């Protein structure tokens, strides 16, 4: 998932305060306490009853609260080690992505691609700190991770308490690679940003903030009111690549385990992927991948799609948004897919 609320830096940065994503166990709980609406997200990990009391002084001096703090601190230390190990893997994973792009016959500029991958920072958050950061930095997040194009930073969650996961314990850590690969693809995609300035009274301009202008095939207009375009289609393309590339970066014991993780990956953005599949019946997949990674190639994709389906990417995107709005989260885009198949 790509950042959505990135029109400006978060308030505390604009006001000149330091931005820090590190939080002690205690601060984590303080941030969570400020957002009672997130209680459900932490449900089995902090009981609803305790969640409501996070802001209460009496609860903060209880043994229960101290146990929560030390649990969060221990988890953070452990996850930090995993994060450092994985950060070292990024260039190798980047190579797998490049190989894939070349193997399917799409184009990539080596230097440009390496630069994007080398500079991306990874930041792992346990479930508690993930939501505490959502509260503190006011970013939208309803997935296992997100990529901030402003910060060129990937956030992701590391496994929660094993007893709440359906996956076998030995696969839980491996399973996070699905999220990492997804966010890494966003980070490696073609990018462009709007930069905003304030006019100074005495002349000249001061930097005010940035916003994503282009990420993969999705584009954002410069004004506040207009909505982002092609986001859902962009997620479909991203996840189709994840399913293809994931086996190359997994280190699991056998094919059966690989199968379990790939099946899981295919459930994410599965309906968006179906729209992409419908489009690739007439427009070659490499044309999509080219458009995703290369700044100039988006126009070609748009032209081909229009030629084959009589619709522009923007019209397809508007249809997806409308259908999703009308039918909710589980929307399968059946109307659109029927239309595309009939053309
Ligand atoms: Zn995404």
Image: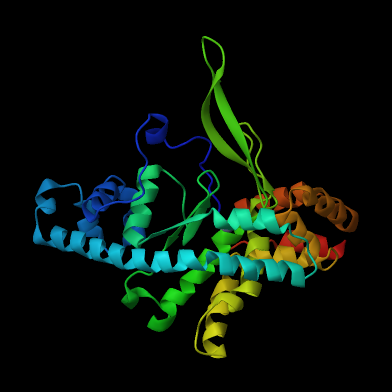
Residue sitting at x 84%, y 52%: 300
Please name whichever residue, 277 or 324, is drawn nearer the observer in this view of the structure. Answer: 277
* Residue 328 seen by the camera: no
Q: Position of residue 79 (x, y in %)?
A: 35, 66
Ligand 1's image quarter is bottom right
Residue sitting at x 53%, y 36%: 7
Q: Is residue 146 left or right of residue 216?
A: left
Q: Is residue 1 left or right of residue 308?
A: left
Q: Position of residue 139 (x, y in %)?
A: 45, 46
- Seen in the picture, residue 151 relative to 203 is either above or below; the reply is below
Name the image quarter holding residue 242.
Answer: bottom right
* Residue 219 seen by the camera: yes
Please name whichever residue, 101 or 47, is drawn nearer the observer in this view of the structure. Answer: 101
The single residue placed furthest to the right in the displayed view is 307
Q: Is residue 286 left or right of residue 251?
A: right
Q: Position of residue 270 (x, y in %)?
A: 62, 68
Please name whichever residue, 18 or 299, is drawn nearer the observer in this view of the structure. Answer: 18
For the C terminus, give its image quadrant: bottom right
- Seen in the picture, residue 267 relative to 64 is either above or below; the reply is below
The single residue placed furthest to the top in the displayed view is 202
Q: Position of residue 170 (x, y in %)?
A: 40, 83
Residue sitting at x 13%, y 52%: 60
Residue sitting at x 15%, y 58%: 65
For the N terminus, give its image quadrant: bottom right
Q: Is residue 65 left or right of residue 149?
A: left
């Amino acid at each position: 998932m790509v950042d959505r609320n990135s029109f400006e830096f978060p308030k505390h940065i604009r006001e000149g305060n330091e931005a820090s994503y590190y939080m002690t166990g205690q601060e984590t709980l303080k941030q969570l306490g400020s957002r009672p609406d997130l209680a459900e997200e932490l449900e089995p990990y902090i009981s609803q009853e305790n969640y409501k009391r996070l802001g209460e002084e009496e609860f903060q001096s209880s043994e229960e609260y101290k146990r929560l703090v030390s649990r969060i601190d221990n988890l953070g230390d452990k996850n930090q080690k995993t994060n450092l190990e994985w950060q070292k893997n990024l260039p190798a994973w980047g190579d797998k992505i490049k190989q894939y792009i070349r193997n399917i016959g799409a184009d990539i500029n080596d230097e440009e691609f390496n630069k994007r991958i080398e500079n991306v920072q990874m930041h792992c958050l346990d479930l508690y700190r993930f939501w505490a950061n959502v509260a503190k930095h006011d970013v939208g997040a309803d997935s296992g991770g997100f990529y901030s194009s402003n910060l060129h930073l990937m956030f992701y969650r590391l496994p929660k308490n094993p007893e709440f996961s359906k996956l076998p314990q030995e696969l839980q850590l491996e399973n996070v690679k699905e999220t990492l690969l997804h966010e890494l693809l966003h980070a490696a995609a073609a990018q462009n940003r709007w930069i905003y300035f304030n006019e100074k009274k005495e002349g000249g301009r001061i930097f005010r903030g940035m916003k994503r202008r282009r990420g993969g095939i999705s584009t954002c207009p410069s004004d506040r009111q207009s909505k982002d375009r092609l986001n859902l289609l962009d997620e479909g393309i991203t996840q189709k690549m994840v399913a293809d590339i994931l086996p190359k970066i997994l280190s699991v014991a056998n094919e059966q385990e690989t199968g379990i993780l790939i099946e899981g990956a295919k459930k994410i953005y599965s309906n968006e992927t179906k729209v992409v599949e419908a489009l690739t019946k007439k427009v070659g997949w490499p044309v999509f991948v080219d458009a995703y990674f290369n700044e100039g190639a988006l126009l070609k994709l748009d032209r081909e799609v229009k030629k084959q389906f009589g619709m522009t990417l923007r019209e397809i995107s508007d249809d997806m948004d409308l259908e999703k709005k009308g039918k909710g989260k589980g929307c399968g885009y059946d109307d659109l897919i029927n239309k595309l198949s009939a053309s």
